[in-house]
Amino acid sequence: MRYTPAGIAVTEFKIGHASRQIEAGKPRKVECEIPVVALAQSLETVAAITPGTMVKVAGFLAKKSRMSLQLVLHASKIDFI
């Protein structure tokens, strides 16, 4: 956990995704890791997440930093599935 210059608590973690999708009429296995940033209101929920826990994360995508092209999911809501 870290704090922004405004004193807001921020934590970062990754979620994994695995599914089978259809692309061009053919099945395809999709796997990826998505970096997530959660602010103060979600910290208690994030603390309860352990590896293998299934969660649903809602939020928005933004650049990791002003000069970066990497995307990060900014979580506005985290629910256990």
Image (cartoon, rainbow, N blue to C red):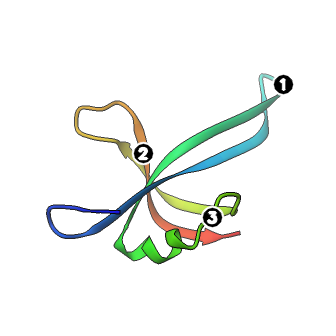
> Which comes sooner in the sequence, label 1 or label 2?
1
> Which comes sooner in the sequence, label 3 or label 1?
1
Gap between marks 1 and 2, in whole Å? 30 Å
Taking the image as shown, residue 11 lies to the left or right of residue 22, namely: left
Q: Which residue is drawn at the image coordinates 51% and 71% (left, top)? A: 47
Element marked by disc 1 = loop
Q: Which residue is drawn at the image coordinates 77% and 42% (left, top)? A: 19
> Which comes sooner in the sequence, label 3 or label 2?
3
Q: Which residue is mark 1?
A: 25
Q: Which residue is mark 2?
A: 72
Residue 41 placement (x, y as % from top left):
39, 76
Q: Which residue is mark 3?
A: 50
Foreground tag (3 vs 2): 3
Residue 69 — which label?
none
Element marked by disc 2 = strand
Most extreme residue toward the left, as rendered? 5
Quarter of the rendering containing residue 43: bottom left
- For the N terminus, the quadrant is bottom left
Three-letter code for the amino acid on which mark 3 is drawn:
Thr
